[in-house]
Every structure is written in C-alpha cells, then in structure tokens.
Amino acid sequence: MRTRFLFIILILLVLSLSFNGKTNSKGDNLQSFAHTNAIKSADWVKDAIIYSVYLRSFSPEGTFEALEKRIPELKEMGVNVIWLMPIHPIGLKNRKGKLGSPYSIRDYYDTNPEFGSIVDFQKLLAVVHQNRMKLILDLVINHTAWDSKLIQQHPEWFSKDSSGNIISPNDDWTDVADLDYSKPGLRKYMLDMMEWWVKDIGIDGFRCDVSELVPIDFWEEARSRLNKIKPIMMLSEGSLPEHHLKAFDITYSWNIYDALEPLLKKERSAKFLDTLLQNEKAEFPINSLRLRFNTNHDKNAWDAPAIIKFGKDGLKLSAILINTMPGIPLIYNGEEVANDRKLGLFEKVDIDWNKSREMDTLYRSLYKLRKDHKAISRGKFIKVPTSNDTNIFAFLRIEGKDRILVILNFSETKQAPKIQSEEIIGKESNITLLDIFKNTSQMIEKGEPFTPSIDPFGYHIYIVSDK
C-alpha cells in the first residue's frame, strides 16, 4: 500500500485495511499503485496503433518478404507499430502439431527458415522504418524448446523436479522446458540477447510472453539497459499494475476483453464498463497504458474468431470501444476482413484476404480519428450520464480544446437516450456535433437535451466544436 503522507498510526491502519481489502471483478486481492507514476513512455508509444502479425497465416508464402510487400498498405491503413509473433527456429523434440508452436524456441539469435533468414528480416525492418513505423518482436523467455541451444549448453539454467529432471512450466505446455531465473548466468544471457536485437539489429522493443512468470526485477533491469540504447516499447502479456512502474509501457487489458461477450449478451449492464475503468484508475499507476483488444492470437486460436464470438454488429461495436477508450489499440491480422478462421498455432491456416473489406473501412476511420485527435490517444476520459445507462455507454475524450463524444448502444433494440447538454457543452452557450461516419452536423444549445437515435448495437462518434 502507498500513502502520500505520514499520518498517525491509526490513520495508516485504516488506509491499509481499505487497500488490502480491495478486490477486482474476479475477486482477486489487489494492491493500489494509484498514487505512483507509471514509467515515462515515448510519444510514439503513446500514439501506437499495434498490428499483430502471425507470419504463417498472413500470406500464402508465410515469409518476411511477403509481409514486407504489404507494409505500405498497413501504413496507409493507419498502423504505426508491427508486432511480429515469434520469428525464431522452432523445436523438433516434443513439438505439437506438424509445424510446432512458434512459442517453442530453439535459438534466440536466429530466425525460423520457414519465414526467411536474418538478412530477410533486416530487409523487412528497413522497410518498416522507411515507412516511419516501428517493429517489436515477441519475446518468449520463460521457457525454451526441449532441443534448444540453451538446454544443450546450459541444462543447469532450467527448472527441475525432485529427481533432477528438467520440467515443463505446467502439464499442458509439454513442448517447452521451464527456465530458472535464480541463475545469474541465465539472466545475463537473456539481457545480452535483448540488447543485441535492439542495438545491433535495430528493433524497437518487445511484446513479452507470459511476463508474469518471469521475475519483475529481471524486466526492470532489462528496461534500464535498453533505455540507454534508444526509446523502446515494452508490452507485457500480463495485467500487474507494478509492471508499469519501471519495466513496461503497456499491459494486457483482459478486464475489458472479458467483459465484451457478457455486455453484448446483456448479461452485464453497460455501466459495468465504467466500473472496470474506475477500478483501473484505483489500482494502476498514473498514466498507465493498457492494451485494448477484441481478439488476439490466443483468443482466435483457442476460443473463436471475433466475428464468430461477437457477430457482425458486436464486432463493429467492440472495435469502436477499444479504439476510442483510453489505452493502446491492437488489431490482429485478418480482422480488417473479419477473419472467420481459427489461425492455429501448430499448423498453417491462411487468412482469406478476398472477404469483405467493411471492417477495413471502419478501422481506417478509427485510426484517422486517433491520428488527427490527441483527445483519443492522450485525452482525459469523462463518463457522460444518459437516461439509459443500462444499455448506453457514453463518454467524452478531452485534450485541451479537442473533444470527442462517443455513444455506444449495447442493446439489440434501437435507443434514443436523453443526454443533458451541460454534460457535453461545458462553458460554451452552444456547440456543434460532427458525426464522423455520416459527415453530418447538428447544433446543441445549452439547456436543451440531446437525444441521438442509435441503431441496435449501433454507435455515434462526434467531434465536438464550439463553432
């Protein structure tokens, strides 16, 4: 627990009890870091729109070269950060499926020949940088393949059972062996390897797999070393508030993802979203960046593609939400064509790029909005009350004079919620609302209620102006 001042013992005890008794929506005990500051992130990190690429599925060729050809297209779409899922050689021993999991790594200093050579990767990286974009690599250092170079050269760096046998991290991950971070030699090896990819190869950071299973002091030391090279992005596949203090820019927002299906099925009120955001504010360091997503490679492969899970309308509504609420938006490859295939991690399943580009159009509009309006990427979040907050989630994003109003209908019926003008007008006597999708505008006078008509699972995004 953290307090700002040293009060008398009784006050400290009361505050301690109030924090220690705090739980999240899953009932987990939480420690509040709300009075601390998150690590300072580079501007390009704060403005990031991350596109996750699974090379096997992204193209028929499944190569660095095939992705390289489409980098200008992704830039035009509005993407500015490419996250490459693991690119290293994959283990043969105990592998799952025909091709094996990319998260079973044999050599951290090489690339999977299935994707291309290290030279091919460097060509891709050069094109990414030429297009003023960034590239981060998936970093998998909690475990290695059973036939990895590390297990051959340093078996003492691995976790063992009571009989001295190397073990997997858990009963399901049978294709990988668990690393033991109590070993100083392992830590030095991993730190040197991370530094090599950033300094010598030139990547811009890492997405860190199962980061909560690696000691936080390791991540903090890694960040300290990498900061001396250049501004980087560190994305944690974890949800620990303390990850934001010294190590990571961004953590996974599982809380919002887990709420999407219950919201769309009316098992939760729209008010629940505000509860989740208020909980974040009470738990996480100031200016913490959360990764917002409506699918990712794990959920696509092991649960269901987003279009199947949420339906067409739910997919659109969830895309609007994750791209306008505070945080860093993620799009998984294929979502711009509403990919309906499970992209399995042990085989090659191609994305069908000939499908409708309706979602592509939506994402382009959202990314342009984010680029043109700092209220979305940097702005304050203000919940806007309506006459029907059970079904409607409305909020303002504000950065200086830049204001964006978002209204979402989590209902299968048409809604016309009443919003008091004072909630969005502020000091002005009247304002103009420009609908970014319909390109229509309307004036709202102070004292007059605003009653927008919203289709089932529909949405409005307005640029608020005093003109």
Image (cartoon, rainbow, N blue to C red):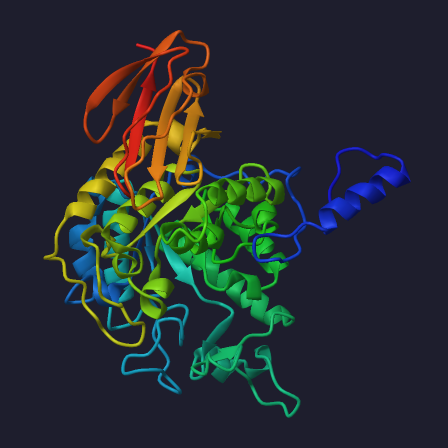
Q: Quadrant of residue 438?
A: top left
Residue at 18% x, 60% y: name it: 65
Residue at 46% x, 29% y: name it: 385
Is 387 on the left or on the right of 220, as rendered? Answer: left
Is 232 on the left or on the right of 285, as rendered? Answer: left
Decide which of 115, 230 is in the foreground and name it.
115
The single residue placed furthest to the top in the displayed view is 429
Residue at 56% x, 47% y: name it: 244
The single residue placed furthest to the right in the displayed view is 9
Decide which of 343, 166 is in the foreground and name it.
343
Using the image, determine if residue 135 lies above or below residue 327: below
Report whether residue 208 is seen. Answer: yes
Q: Is the C terminus in the top left, top right, bottom left or bottom right quadrant?
A: top left
In percent of width and height, residue 279 lies at 58, 44
In percent of width and height, residue 156 lies at 59, 81
Using the image, determine if residue 286 lies above or below residue 143: above
